[in-house]
Amino acid sequence: MKNLVLTLLFACFMLVANNSMAQTKIGHLDSSELLQGLPEWQTAQKEVQTFMEMKKKDLAAKNQALVDDYNKLVEQDNKGLLTPLDKQKKGDEMQKRQDALQQEQAKAEEELDAKQTTLTDPIRKKVKDAIAAVAKEKGYNYIIDNSAGVLLYDSPTDDISAFVKDKLR
């Protein structure tokens, strides 16, 4: 009798556990692939790339001017055309220019990050909202991003990429 009660309790427990597990639905997609396929993402990436190249070119020109001026200074010093006082003044000036260039490089990196954030955050939000809408419509409790590289198995029937792409159109 005791074994029968334990067996019935175990069977009920398994039934309840099985039901609760069956209610959890997990989908997946590759957000990197999804983003790369969006025209607005490609446009934003091109704009960021153009901005970065412009900043690089500007900084490279300023760096080259600094190098050229330094080489002229060394040449003048080698010819004995500079007094120790002139040498010190010009050396201090060169150091200030180099410090200013380093600050400008740091500022350019910050501007690049801000530009990328400004251009891509609205697109990411749009994609996230589309994913949430598809998950809700299709009854998914969780959506896993394959691009993170930790998914060990995925079922093709639970790939919601096509649904999200349709939602974004």
Image: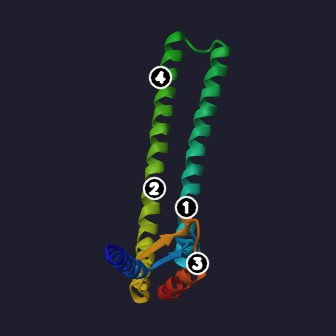
Crowd rating for badge 4 (residues with CA inside 10 Å; few <14, some 14–19, many 20+): few
* Amino acid type at mark 4: Asp
Q: How far apart are the alpha carbons under marks 3 and 1?
A: 15 Å
In terms of depth relative to the viewer, which is nearer, 30 or 27? 27
From the image, tell me which residue sits under label 4: 92
The quarter of the displayed image where residue 122 is located: bottom left
Callout in the foreground (3, 2): 3
Q: How many marks?
A: 4
Q: Position of residue 11 (x, y in %)?
A: 38, 79
Asked if the residues shown at circle 4 and circle 2 are in contact, with their CB atoms under 8 angstroms apart, the answer is no
Mark 4 vs mark 2: which is more N-terminal? Answer: 4
SS under mark 4: helix
Mark 3 vs mark 4: which is more N-terminal? Answer: 4
SS under mark 2: helix
Mark 3 vs mark 2: which is more N-terminal? Answer: 2
130 versus 107 height, above or below? below
Callout in the foreground (4, 2): 2
Q: Position of residue 158 (x, y in %)?
A: 53, 81
Asked if the residues shown at circle 1 and circle 4 are in contact, with their CB atoms under 8 angstroms apart, the answer is no
From the image, tell me which residue sits under label 2: 113
From the image, tell me which residue sits under label 3: 155
Q: Position of residue 100 (x, y in %)?
A: 45, 36
44 versus 80 height, above or below? below
Q: How far apart are the alpha carbons under marks 1 and 2?
A: 27 Å
Q: How far apart are the alpha carbons under marks 4 and 2?
A: 32 Å
Q: Position of residue 113 (x, y in %)?
A: 45, 55
Residue that protrudes farthest toward the front in the picture: 1
From the image, tell me which residue sits under label 1: 150
Q: Is residue 126 left or right of residue 39?
A: left
SS under mark 3: loop
Asked if the residues shown at circle 1 and circle 2 are in contact, with their CB atoms under 8 angstroms apart, the answer is no
